[in-house]
Amino acid sequence: MKKGTVFLLSIMTILMFTGCKANSVLENKKVNAKEAVQIIVSKDFGNETVFDKNIPFEEDTSIMDIMQENFDIETAYGGGFVNAINGIKSGFTGAKEKRKRDWFYYVNGILSQVGAGDFYLKPDDVVIWDYHDWSNNMYMSSIIGAYPKNFICDDEDAVEKTEIRYDKTYENESKKLAVFLKDRGLTNLQLANLDGKDIANEKVNTIMIGTWDEMVKIDYIKELYENRKKVGLFFNMDNDIKALTFMGEVTKEYDKAAVIASIVKGYGSTGTLWLVTGNDENCIKRAVKLLFEKPEELRGKFAAIVTEQEILNIPTLN
């Protein structure tokens, strides 16, 4: 990846055509009646949960269908754009005093790229709608809040395999994580040493587990971190770990902490890079254990800073 490369769409294209690349109308398979999906509605990058519930649906149900059946929805742009959910309206579309605040949705952790009316649901999909600021024209294209569905799906265009790359210090936790994911249906999973070989492969989901000092030696990760505001990493990692707002302002600092964050590997890609890293061994181990012991603690979060006392959603609010 060349220095400065960022994985961005035109923000108005995203607003008008939200959906998931791997789930176009023609590619989706029909589902049986009385299946369910998880719908989460939140505000400000997952910092305020408005709604979180499993909702049953029948075959041939689109995301727009299920939203209109269960929420008070207003649409725009010929019905393809969700302009309001339960009275929370776009601050831009149709507004007299325009503010760049809108609804975005993620399916199984990936920011959507097609209209909600064109995305047909499958059993156990996790759909997260979040109302947030886009005034810096940046966005988070991959979030951790649908875990473990981020890695377990049956889309035809999904990644070919998942790999867990780990520092030896975290071997025990990494192996338990592998068992957890396999038990939930992930078939093509490999364990490997922590290194940067072929890490940019967009057909592979990669989970990296290790200290930041080791992680940042990998050129690909170092470059992503240097462009963190553009690719959606809202933490600073030097001697301390700092939590950032979406605009890059520091709100909290930790002498010991870990981070769980996810980034897409390329424009339009469903292949993701997950970083489970930090500056403290115990905090990193706790972060990995969350993935296989208490995954519900990550539900709806965009990314997380993990300490011995708390799990903080990032980006934070002012």
Image: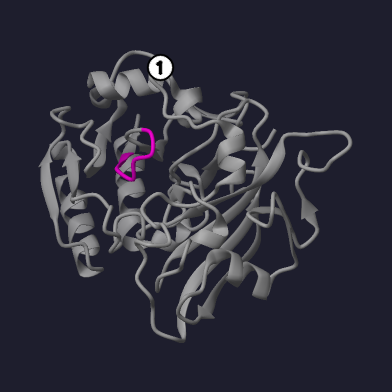
Per the image, is 115 magenta?
A: no
Residue at screen point 44% across, 52% down: 20
Q: Which residue is mark 1?
A: 226
What residue type is disc 1 on?
Glu
The front one of 208 and 154 is: 154
Picture quarter containing residue 278? top left
Q: Residue visible at 52% across and 81% down?
A: 56
Asked whether 57 or 211 is in front, the reply is: 57
The residue at 29%/43% (across/down) is 271
Q: Which portion, as a residue range, is magenta? A: 267-274
Nearest the camera: 5 or 238?
Answer: 5
Instruction: Tell whether 10 sits left or right of 43.
Output: left
Residue farthest to the right, as pictured: 96
Rendered location of residue 225, percent (x, y): 39, 22
In the figure, is residue 84 to the left or right of 267? right
Residue 183 position (above or below residue 129): below
156 or 312: nearer the viewer: 156
Coloring scheme used: one colour
- Residue 92's image quarter? top right
- Give the residue at the far bottom of this rendering: 34
- Quadrant where the image shows the N terminus: top left
Q: Main secondary structure of the magenta part?
A: loop
Task: Work out which quarter of the rendered image holds the C terminus and state it.
Answer: top right
In the rendered image, residue 270 lying in the magenta stretch gets the answer yes
- Mark 1 surroundings: few (<14), some (14-19) or many (≥20) residues within 10 A: some
Q: Tell me if residue 65 comes above or below residue 160 in the rendering.
A: below
Query: Which secondary structure lies at badge 1?
Result: helix
The answer to whether residue 257 shows anywhere in this view is: yes
Residue 7 position within the rendered picture, expressed as x and y whole percent measured from the top left: 42, 29
Residue 120 place in picture, x, y as percent: 46, 66
